[in-house]
Image: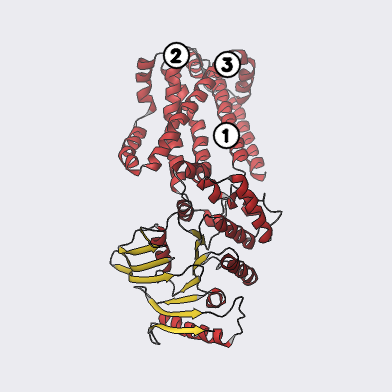
Amino acid sequence: MRANIFALILMFLVLGIWQMACGFFAIPDFILPAPYEIIMTAIIKAPVIFPNALVTGVEIISGIALALVFAIPFAMIMFAKPSIEKAVSPFLVASQAIPVFAIAPLLIVWLGYGIASKVLMAGIIIFFPILVSLLEGFKTCDHELRILFRLMGAGFWKSMRLLYWPWALPNFFAGLKVGVTVATIGAVIGEWVGAQQGLGYLMIQANARLNTNLVFASILWLTAMGLILWSFVGILEKKIINWKVKKEFLP
Amino acid sequence: MLYVSQLSKRFGKNEIFSDFNLTIPENKFIVLIGPSGCGKTTLFDVLTGVTPMEKGNILWKGLRVKNLEKRCAYMQQKDLLLPWLTLLENAVLPAEISGADLEKSKIKAESLFKRMGLAGYENFRPHEISGGMRQRCALIRTLMFPHDFILLDEPLSSLDAITRRRLQSLLLLLQTEFSKTLLMITHDIEEALLLADEIYLLSVQPMGIREKFILDSPKPRKFNDPLLLEIEEHVMDVLQGDISGDTGGETGGDKGYRWR
């Protein structure tokens, strides 16, 4: 609670200094609009921003779904077969060294200007944090619990359902939280490179017209969407993980 | 029931045990005592198949087997209750995994909850109860294994003296009432003397049987029995000799302590 109050005070302090600096130095709106102007634009231009935000939102959520569909089974396969993990890991790590900007134009060429290229872009960017966190969660499962399950004669699926998945859920949600916040990056980059709608598209259009107010208002909407997604995952996490892990279990 | 012969295990150059022999008769409570790090838990790991043996034979009810995986229940120092399950769900876990009738298993578990003084706690989560209660729940889960052989690796060592005494009497029930055969590791000599039918005093690595004590006095025993006190003193002397590096004392294998 105290930390939240501190964060709010800090936020208002930064916004206050920003607002005063814009007035004091008479900074033109097209260079740096004041926070009040940005908030007002975000509200007044909502009818324009909302349909674009909806498109970006659909791209982000579809990207998350796509990443989950591939990352979850992939993590389970890599956990079940360490030889596959060993073979695939170098490629996965190398893929993370490629900037998303570099593949965005290719995806546009391959998948067109529609939603598919942006969904794939968002999916690619989330896939890795979810995969790595889930796999790590499986691997850190308590050794003695594994022995217990083995002695009980538990097969792979029963061990997954009753032991590994519940054990790895905190890791999974940590990865998902990172994923949903970076998913916005993937979708917006895709829209920057080539799109006909979406917040990224709106930002590019507004930027070309020196409508910096609208650029910032779009960023504000994007930030709000990221925060809403992050909070949703947090609530889901608290709802699902309703137990406490004893200290002795922690690695 | 179980006959282990010429069992050997090494980690690199470190020979944990070599040509180790052990016989576990049916419905007996066998206790292994030895200095820390002598290889007792490794022996359990080999028996359960967690780690492979170098060589040796394991005869299980007359059949030669690779290990006792899926043939024995295992209870450890940690209660190993799953924090995401209720106590009842934890207790019936062996039944759920083996695909047994879950409803029947729950009825059986509920009667054991009453027996172990845990009635009313079935829907609690492990973090909501005390360490002693958790260990009792682990004991119920051990009883729910469809096996009549139980390995106990210092199951009571993390508990306070009063809880431990209470659980010792519950461990005895496993043998007397549920006709289980038990092989237990403990560092508590008093606990071994109160519970065991046979005590194996183990030597430092490579682990071997230094002495064997057969205790055929009736249970429950009282620790003020002078004969038990005498054995305790003897075992303490031997173990202290191990710690100080003095391997003196008698190492004559089966010295044959036999009591009433």
Chain-order first, disc 2 or disc 1? 2
Residue A138, picture quadrant: top left
> Which residue is depicted at the point 37% across and 34% down?
A96
Residue A114 tag number = 2
Marks 2 and 1, how far apart in space?
Answer: 27 Å
Mark 2 lies on a secondary structure that is loop
> Which residue, given by chain and number where applicable, does mark 3 sit on?
A49
Q: Residue B160 location, x and y as percent?
A: 62, 69
Distance between the alpha carbons at the discs numbered 2 and 3: 18 Å
Q: Is residue B93 left or right of residue B111?
A: left
Q: Tell me if residue A25 can be seen.
A: no
In this rendering, the answer to whether A14 lies above or below B37 is above
| Residue A66: x %, y % from top left | 46, 26
Of helix, strand and loop, which one carries label 1?
helix
Q: Earlier in the sequence, mark 3 or mark 1?
A: 3
Taking depth in this image into account, of B255 and A15 the one nearest to the observer is B255
| Residue B218 drawn above or below residue B103 | below
Question: What's the chain of the residue with tag 2?
Answer: A
Instruction: Looking at this view, name the residue that lies furthest to the front.
Output: B62
